[in-house]
Amino acid sequence: MTCSVTVQPSGRHFEAQPDETLLAAAIRQGVGLPYGCKDGACGSCKCQLISGTVVHGAHQAKALTPEEEAAGKILSCRAVPQTDCVLDAPQVTAVDQFPVLKMPARVISISKLTRDVAVVQLQLPANQTFRYQAGQYVDVLLRDGARRSYSMASAPRDGQISIELHIRHLPGGKFTDHVFGAMKEKEILRLEGPFGSFGVQAGEAPIILLASGTGFAPIKAILEVLQAEAATRPVSLYWGCRTKADLYAEDWIKQALTTLPQLRYVPVLSEPRTEEAWAGRTGLVHEAVMQDHPNLAEHQVYACGVPVMVDAAQRDFVAQCALPAQAFFADAFTSEADKAAVNAAE
């Protein structure tokens, strides 16, 4: 028997099939709930269950604590409704604004910018319109049914014919070993997307963009949108990497600084090499933000990268810098190990 689900405050309705999670049903019917990993590991889909009952699949405690669950919080990506339900969750995109598509993509170029980061340009089908929001991601569909998720590093635009992905090599990685080994130009990949709800919200509040490693990819797409819109909101970009060599997109950032005069760029290295003679900021990237912005009460923060950085930034910005909890937006890169831990618990 299907269950009817109502989302407040938007008033949207959708139906969930037996054994279907709330998020899967919402995506299938074009209802834009917030979410990230879809695997119970990041917590981006957390929302309040106003009425009804659900059964939760396995998930990481950091995504939904027992205390939160006892207070009626749920993860829509792991919650299967048992009755009709009412949720309190924001509608993050308009109805069917960004339909999920499956499509082939041809490799245009592979640029290995560092020892472990490649920028891959993909050509999309000319007869298919692919719409997305800067900050969203696509899944690369592998032959064995596995998926690998990568954020678009290029802004959406009319007549979209290509997208850019930033891919970090993880030795032994099922897909990244191929990217850094046998992948050739003109190779065909299978994609599905767009997914995710990360992206800049409307308003005039000053923006803090916070990235670690290849978490810069969706941040780059957001900056391209701000460029195209000739936005005037103050923007501060903090990019954390291990070494100076890992700041793989600094040439692009230097160009962006000329077109966005209100943009401030602060690179932060956690393990600078002696031979690099680094004179810039060091330490944890989110702590650099706190040093420069002890009061974030009027800001919006967009954080993307490894979960430990995202979690620390959210906790410390809210607790120590007066950032409103609802002004923190994040896309944590959930590793295959994190997802495997969830699956092993099922």
Image (cartoon, rainbow, N blue to C red):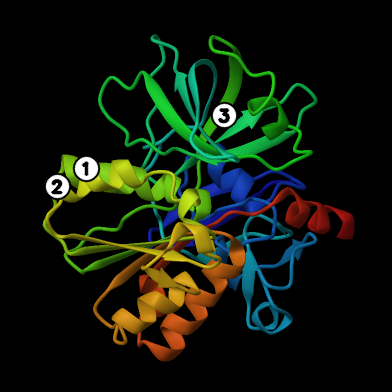
Instruction: Give the residue number, with chain letter if any, for mark 3.
Output: 192
Which residue lies most toward the front here? 275
Amino acid tagged 1: Gln
Q: Estimate how packed mark 2 is, as few (under 14), some (14 to 19) or many (20 or more) residues with alpha carbons within 10 Å.
A: few
Instruction: Give the residue number, with chain letter if any, for mark 1.
Output: 255
On screen, residue 159 above or below 311:
above
Residue at 75% of width from left, 63% of height from top?
A: 59
Q: Nearer the viewer, residue 292 or 153?
A: 292
> Of marks 1 and 3, which one's residue comes earlier in the chain?
3
Q: Position of residue 214 (x, y in %)?
A: 51, 48
Q: Position of residue 334 (x, y in %)?
A: 64, 54
Q: Quadrant of the C terminus?
A: bottom right
Q: Position of residue 24 (x, y in %)?
A: 63, 45
Q: Nearer the viewer, residue 20 or 211?
A: 211
Give the SS element for disc 2. helix
Amino acid tagged 2: Thr
Q: Position of residue 111 (x, y in %)?
A: 48, 27
Residue at 45% of width from left, 48% of height from top?
A: 32
On screen, residue 273 above or below 115:
below
